[in-house]
Image (spheres, helix red, strand yellow):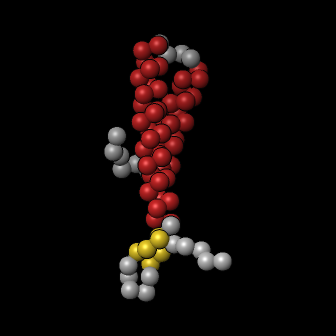
Amino acid sequence: METNKTFEELLTDLENIVKELEQGNIDLEKSIDKYTEAMKIAKDCSDKLENATGKVNKILTENGMLEDFEISE
C-alpha cells in the first residue's frame, strides 16, 4: 500500500478505523476489511518511521556524502 499521505495523515486514518471497530456497529465482514486496512496502514506508518530513522542517522560530511552517524565517547 504505497501512499503519498504523511505519517500524521496515516495515523489519523488508523485512529478513525480503530474508533469504528471499537464502536462495534459494523458487521463481521466489514470489520475484517477494516482490520485488514488498518494493518496495511500500520505497516505504511512503520515503513515511514524506519525511513525517517534512517535519514536521522545519516549526516552530511564535508565532501557532500551521506554516512552513518556515530557518537564517539
Q: Compared with residue 51, is residue 41 higher up or lower down, i.e. above or below?
A: above
Q: Compared with residue 62, is residue 2 higher up or lower down, i.e. above or below?
A: above
The residue shown at (48%, 50%) is 7
As drawn, which residue projects farthest toward the right? Answer: 73
Looking at the image, residue 19 sits to the left or right of residue 54; the answer is right
As drawn, which residue projects farthest toward the top? Answer: 27
Residue 27: % across, % down: 47, 12
Residue 63: % across, % down: 38, 86
Front residue (pair 51, 6): 51
The residue shown at (45%, 33%) is 39
Looking at the image, residue 29 sits to the left or right of residue 15; the answer is left
Q: Compared with residue 64, is residue 53 higher up or lower down, i.e. above or below?
A: above
Residue 33: % across, % down: 41, 23
As drawn, which residue projects farthest toward the bottom? Answer: 62
Front residue (pair 10, 64): 64
As drawn, which residue projects farthest toward the front? Answer: 73
The answer to whether residue 9 is seen in the rendering is no
Residue 28: % across, % down: 47, 13
Q: Compared with residue 16, is residue 3 higher up or lower down, i.e. above or below?
A: below
The answer to whether residue 68 is seen in the rendering is yes
Front residue (pair 10, 54): 54
Numbered-mark total: 0
**Residue 15 placement: quadrant:** top right
The residue shown at (47%, 26%) is 35
Which corner quadrant holds the C terminus?
A: bottom right
Which corner quadrant holds the N terminus?
A: top left
